[in-house]
Amino acid sequence: MTSSSLSFHDALPQIGHGLPAASLVEELLGLPHRLRAVVESPPGTGKTTIIPPLLAARAEHREPGPKVVVTQPRRVAARAAARRLAQLTRTSVGDHIGYTVRGDAKVSAQTQIEFVTVGVLLRRLLRDPDLDDVSAVVIDEIHERSVETDLTAAFIRDLLPRRDDLELVAMSATAQSQQWVNYFDAALFTAHTEIYALTEEFSQPPTALDDRGVTPDFLAHVAKTTAQTSARTEGDVLVFLPGVAEIRAVQRQLPEALVLTGSSTVEEQDQVLSRANHQRIILATNVAESSLTVPGVRAVVDSGLERTQRLDTMRAMTGLVTVGASKASMRQRAGRAARLGPGLVVRCVTEREYAARPSDITPEILTSDLTSAVLFLACWGPTRLPTCPPQRAYRAAVEVLGALEAIEPPDKDSGAWPVVTDLGRRLASVPTEPRLARALLDGSELLDPATAATAVALLDSDQRAPGVNVRARELPREAHRFLGLTGATPSGIAPAEKPREQDLATVAALAYPDRIARRRDRNSREFLLVSGTAAELPRDSRLPQTDWLVCTEVGLLRGKPIIRAAVPVDQDTVELLLPVTQERVAEWSGQKVNVREVSRIGAIIVNQTPVAATSDDTLQATARAIRVQGLEALNPSQQFWQYWDRLRFAHHHLPDWPDPQRFTPEQWAPFAQDLLSGLKTLVGWDKDAELQTRVPERLTVPSGSSYRVDYSQDPPVLAVKLQEMFGAVETPTIADVPVSIHLLSPAGRPLAITQDLPFFWSEVYPQVRAENRGRYAKHPWPEDPTTATATRLTNKRLHR
């Protein structure tokens, strides 16, 4: 059929031939009312191929005709879906069926089905909130729960009441569709497919992750498992790995293997997605999990790992981390092996580890940086998201956007929706993260538009590390695209050139001023960021030896920040772009104060000079030390703590006595050299005299001896030898609190504790006497201690 005469209604049988999802065509095509549906079926059943032309067929006899927009989570999937549907309809990509992804589009005035990445539709919604020329929207792979997919779902949900004629289909490869049925108030349609037997095996691996990432031993295990699996199966073997680096490592051990990633070229994609007459091994990221169908696969080797974004709100940074995949993801991967017949999956985890994995995919909005999302939300207005974002991550995004002047931040506790500024709307229109969008605009003024555009194109790519060759045709194209967004004419860019290292560093610093970092020590791999976070370079980093970096990507490895990508920068550039603050720093150190004049950029000290301490320096440093370490920083004497304990006792048991804990570090600071005198001064010397009377330091016992009272416990404790308390018929009290008498043996060992001496003498003493008079026969043990003479002496000395 020719492009000018394409009827999607007539083409549906040809398009759907052999596709399990085609079983829905008759039912969906015949529905008389506008379609709001959730379509659920496993990966590889043809949802992406049959549903868009079905919706186009439903709109063929309506005005102004069909225009179906289909979202895909990845550029590679959007291009592949458009090419596949164009092949089935015997048309050219860009005619009736086209695609638009960031930096690349093949569409025309007659395009009726357009595959787009989710970000493209999001920005289109901000420009045209009603999507006036669109007859239907398909949100594909909605189960993946990316932030952009959740935002798109929310915005389309808001649009539906205004566009009663707009048809919507959300498509999911998992059985968790009821949430979307409820969210869109939609009907659920399930495409049933023949279920083939799937053999599941578990291959116990060596340790998968260490402080450097995925271990070489684990990747060697994956390669060996793949080779063994290939040898015992007839079809293709699809291997899931977390990222490109791991794919390259395994490919070095399996050199004949093909590769499929989100950055694969069209030629590489075609080689993988076309049928072959020989067995193949395909190494893939999770792009092959549900977005793309690889024909001929009869076995899957699953590393059980995935790479995902994680936000560390405490350090105010986001990084890619390698984690264990959920059971839902691993089941989808396994399903690729049993689509055409009985299949095999070999999981490189133990059965116990697999059972412990999370059941479902975690929505990205719960774990990732929300800066772009909050900017979209500010542009769109109040909406109901499928999953609410964490408040800490939301506030962090609001703070960043406020610093970029993209929004007017609401009061922290008001709950108000952020208000977007004109600059914010401009940043949202730039298809990159807000930080880079702002760097594009600022860099255009500081350098020139062409240089800024080329630098942003490089920083926005996945090729940021030195030594990696950016594809020659991609950088100029991306640079031209960004240049057009600055308002400048694109004639100033030399297509094959990269920016100078200094210009790249300048633009990177404009985008990530809080990620500028300085090396801790000359031979250290650790850097201190302006934000105060410490991050390390990997041991195998190819970055040149430099003292300053702009960290364009910081990953998290077992909770530790790792610099994944960075641009060297010189200190002069840093000081040009960021303010250098001067401060006088006084620190308490070992009973003395050290003072420095410090120049710093954020948390990074760039220069410091020792200077003499003034009295104000001493007071401030002392107060700061007390605030951080408590009074222990000043090494108080034992006499101080004894006096402190007496005051605390008086405060609790006598009226109108001050609590020594109420005094501030600033009140203590002048008395650093004599805390005891300071405490007496703060309390008042009149109280000191009263304290001696009402809360005495020592008590005199019947023997005439005087002993210190321990007020660190409540009630206070008096430790005394039992013989020295003979004749005491009442328990001593302090502030009406009976003292806890710790009665000791002649050798000073504990015999008994009492707050009731009369009871002790009558009920307990006889047993104590019986147990100890033989052991301490030289000392008096009278039968009636209440009438005996108190003494410290032995019997012999007592009767001289």
Image (cartoon, grey):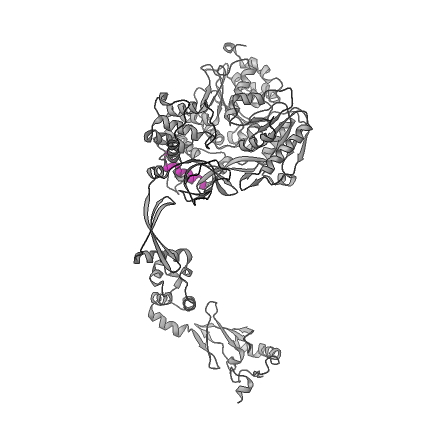
**In this orientation, does residue 39 appear?**
no
Q: Position of residue 208 (x, y in %)?
A: 59, 39
Q: Is residue 705 left or right of residue 231?
A: left
Q: Position of residue 102 (x, y in %)?
A: 45, 25
Quarter of the image with the N terminus is top right
Q: Position of residue 654 (x, y in %)?
A: 40, 69
Stretch in magenta: 392-421
Instruction: Between residue 172 and residue 605, name the one nearer to us.
Output: 605
589 up-or-down from 266: above or below: below
**In this orientation, does residue 247 appear?**
yes
Instruction: Between residue 798 and residue 215, name the one nearer to us.
Output: 215
Residue 495 found in image quarter: top left
30 up-or-down from 691: above or below: above
Residue 511 found in image quarter: top left
Q: Is residue 395 magenta?
A: yes
Q: Is residue 20 magenta?
A: no
Q: Is residue 76 left or right of residue 614?
A: right
100 up-or-down from 747: above or below: above
Q: Is residue 798 left or right of residue 478?
A: right
